[in-house]
Image: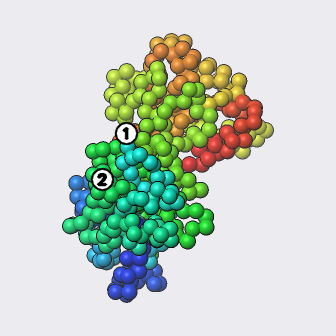
Amino acid sequence: MLGITFAPMLRALGALALIAASPGVLDAADGNVPGELVDATKFRVCADPDNLPYSNEAGEGFENKIAELLAGELGREITYSWYPSTIGFVRNTLAARICDVVIGTTIVNELMQNTNPYYRSTYALIQRADASHKILSLDDPALKDMRIGGVANTPPITLLATRGLLGNLAPYQLMADTRYDHPAQNMVEDVETGEIDIAVVWGPIGGYFAKQADGAMAVTPLKADDGSPMRLDFRISMGLRRGEPIWKEQLNDLLREQKPAIEAILQDYGVPLLDNQGNPIAAEEQQQGGLVPEPDGYRMADFRAPVPATLSGADVLSTEQLRELVEAEAPLLIDVMPAPRKPKDTDLWIPPTRDNILGSHWLANTGYGELSDEFSDFFKQELAALTANDPGRRLVFYCEADCWMSWNAAKRALALGYEKVAWYPDGTDGWKAAGLPLESAEPAPMPDFLPVTDGSNRTAKRRAFTMLVAD
């Protein structure tokens, strides 16, 4: 990720310093950089060769994985221009036109044009999981008796200063050349060994190294109070040269389409994510290593969220396992992604379409936690017809990544007595990321009734439906 090791905000400050040192390096003041990409056949990435968790030459960082995902979607070969994330990074890479995109930067960066933000993260507290007292905020009185690791001049350290805690601070480097220094990694290691009691560090870095630690570590995302003078969370976008509107539009389309797959990569690396309201997304589940418990019944709301790793009574398939199953057995593939229904009394209607796995049957709106009688019958009758009333027929349910509707639908099929039910949690996002074939499809004709039952939670369900379809 571009710039200073610790924080997107500091990367923006570093960019401002670069402007002062090298005026006009990108002609950023007037945006008159001519032309678009130098080589549109390649996905040319500007990156640090040794800056985990963001990137390295071995391709092990989450920005490497995101770059690979987008290059695959574009059908282009990925190439890298390597330069350490210090002063001179943009000048020697993006501005020199030897690469075309910086995978991660803040949305305020004077040296670059920004895409739409594609994730939002925050500073976090890192403690040993077996600590006698878990710190949840910077206002905890127990911090007065702790040795606190942090980086001077970062927002949380300023907040600690206002609480009279600078005397407790164990300082780590602000400016770091990643060829030689890894202060964030050292900070988390010092928590693990007991050299310090707690660390406050930029979440994507702290979350990653906490997952790499030999001992169990707790990661607690921080959120500034509404009245706080310092902001702790930031939106992250991609950086590109000014004067390249077509490239920007293309990247924005990809980021929107691949949002679930990108978030899955980030969560796999322990990145604390915030929603649009600034609230942690599945924070407790991320602290537990992504373990989401199965509910006793069906998932009733918040259908776009991290899902369990299991479904009692069903097989849970990886992309490779599903590919092998499709080749060996030709199972019934059931897509349950929601879709709008044709309005009554109108001929002005274009049926919804989406790309799903080749050979699938799209039973839209059958993955809610509670179905109307009409949609419950629709689900039952469609499965009976597709299986020729054979309860031993292999069924595979899917939707998209982090979509509870496919989990609900698979569980519902088990309740109907089907004996060979499988669930594919990565959905079309995982299938597409693996370069496997999709085809445009329309949903099976649906009943002329709302998919969910009447009741006090209908408004919430319809709102969730609208949001899911919009994504």
Query: In the rendered image of this protein, does residue 118 appear above or below residue 96?
Result: above
Query: In the rendered image of this protein, does residue 269 appear above or below residue 158?
Result: above
Q: Are marks 1 and 2 in contact (CB under 8 Å)?
A: no
- Residue 378 image offset from top left, x and y in percent: 64, 24
Q: How far apart are marks 1 and 2 (CA)?
A: 47 Å
Query: In the rendered image of this protein, does residue 28 appear above or below residue 132?
Result: below
Q: What crowding class fits label 1: few (fewer than 14 Cα within 10 Å), some (14-19), or many (20 or more)?
A: few
Q: Nearer the viewer, residue 313 or 67?
A: 313
Q: Name the residue under label 1.
A: 436
Q: Which of 204 and 186 is in front in this view?
A: 186
**Res 375 seen here:** yes
Q: Which of 454 and 282 is in front in this view?
A: 282
Viewport quadrant of the N terminus: bottom left
Q: Image quadrant of residue 428?
A: top left
Q: What residue type is labelled 2?
A: Gly
Q: How many labels does the image show?
A: 2
Describe the element under mark 2 as helix, strand or loop: loop
- Residue 10 image offset from top left, x and y in percent: 40, 72
Describe the element under mark 1 as helix, strand or loop: loop
Query: In the rendered image of this protein, does residue 241 appear above or below residue 270?
Result: below
- Residue 279 image offset from top left, x and y in percent: 56, 53
Direction left: furthest residue:
180
Direction front: furthest residue:
145
Q: Name which residue lies at 38% across and 71% down.
A: 152
Q: Name which residue lies at 24% across and 66% down.
A: 181
Q: What crowding class fits label 2: few (fewer than 14 Cα within 10 Å), some (14-19), or many (20 or more)?
A: few
**Res 204 seen here:** no
Q: Name the residue under label 2.
A: 194
Q: Which of 300 and 315 is in front in this view?
A: 300
Determine which of the numbered discs, if any, sits on residue 51 in the image. none
Q: Name which residue lies at 72% across and 45% down.
A: 348
Q: What residue type is labelled 1?
A: Leu
